[in-house]
Image: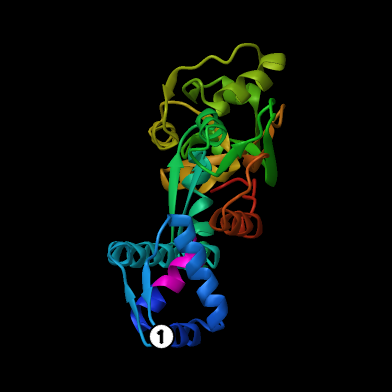
Amino acid sequence: MNVKQLRAFVAVAKYQSFAQAGEHLHVSQPALSLTIKALEDNLGGALLARTTRSVSLTAEGEVLLPLARRLLADWDDTEEMLRQRFTLQLGRVSVAAIPAFAGNLLPHSLKVFRQRYPKVNVTVHDVINEQVLELVRHRRVELGIGFEPDNSDGLNFHPLYLDRFVAVVPADSPLAAQREVTWAQLLAEDFIALQRPSAVRLLLEQNVAALHGKLAVAFESHQLSTIGRMVASGLGVSAVPALCISQMQELGARCVTLVEPAIERRISVMALSDHKLSTAAQALLEVLLSHTQAPEVTCVT
């Protein structure tokens, strides 16, 4: 039993005439008769009682008719829903992003996406880099935004930009007036860091260890906003990706170019290599790639 057969059966039942039903369906009367016969043969009995003057439903046909109408309505609804999703008149997409990106650069891209596709809903998971990877690998989101991992098996990466870490210092600190700050100068102050297993924390530890030894941490927090407020309050200093410059400034801290060593890491959009993106996810990826601007690494005063 298929959709074509059900449409033929419902049309004949409606018009009680093969000729009128064939005209409605734009098929010949012999072709329509063959379609109905195939349906009856498949189900094992007659659905229509035919005479030279009329067509009527058998008892079994009476049972099938309301079910056939409901099945066709569901089919048509499904067709329309999928058509709207393919044309982005309707849809949903989920994306996971590291907090620094989600709170600073992502809103601009989402605004562009919303203007283009106002009926497509977007769910944002604001999580640390390790959870971004986990959500993508477990297919809970189609797109992830974060630092490219060392183990990239099974993932495709679409580079956005190369982010560079900057020093975060109190506004009244002598370091805030400098054009650049060395790690040696920064680590002479109490250091405030994101808690493990943050990718930012691990990246800083790996890059600083060779020249300056183990990273000594005075304060820790899971949230970048909390770190910014701690620095602004004079509790210490920190280092964050350049995309957080405006956020740190709004919290009252100052950002300065950080050198010796300069620490950089590529920010990318990631997706499973064996998974074809939905139409909505592909559209969001295109917006992210075309409307994400790398933050300027400059001293904020």
> In the depicted view, which residue is nearer to us: 188 or 298?
298
Pick the front one: 167 or 4 = 4
Which amino acid, mark 1? Thr
Dominant SS in magenta: helix
> Compared to 99, does 218 lie above or below?
above
The residue lying at 36 percent from left, 82 percent from top is: 16
Q: What is the count of numbered marks?
A: 1
Q: Going 48% across and 56% down the picture, which residue do you hit?
A: 42
Q: Which one is nearer the viewer's eye here, 185 or 249?
A: 249
Can residue 61 be seen here? The reply is: yes
Q: Measuring from the top left, give residue 96's x and y in whole percent.
A: 50, 41
Vertical arrangement, residue 35 with respect to residue 241, above or below? below
Task: Report which quarter residue 289 is drawn in.
Answer: bottom right
Q: Give the range drawn in magenta.
A: 1-9
Is 208 left or right of 174, judged from the image as shown?
right
State the image coordinates of residue 63 (x, y, percent, origin top left): 28, 62
Q: Using the rendered image of the protein, determine whether residue 82 is visible from the camera's viewpoint.
A: no
Residue placed furthest toward the front: 52
Percent across and percent down for residue 250 are 43, 48
Q: Classify mark 1: helix, strand or loop.
A: loop
User: Which scheme is used to colour this image of the protein?
Assistant: rainbow
Look at the image and say whether residue 266 sits in the magenta stretch: no
Q: Which residue lies furthest to the top in this view?
A: 213
Q: Quadrant of residue 146?
A: top right
Residue 257: x and y in percent read: 64, 39
Residue with the mark numbered 1 = 52
Could you classify mark 1 by the number of other residues whose Cα lies within 10 Å: few (under 14), some (14-19), or many (20 or more)? few
Instruction: Find out whether residue 4 is within the magenta segment.
Output: yes
Name the residue located 50 percent from the left edge and 49 percent from the top edge: 104
Would residue 2 appear left or right of 58 to someone viewing this image?
right
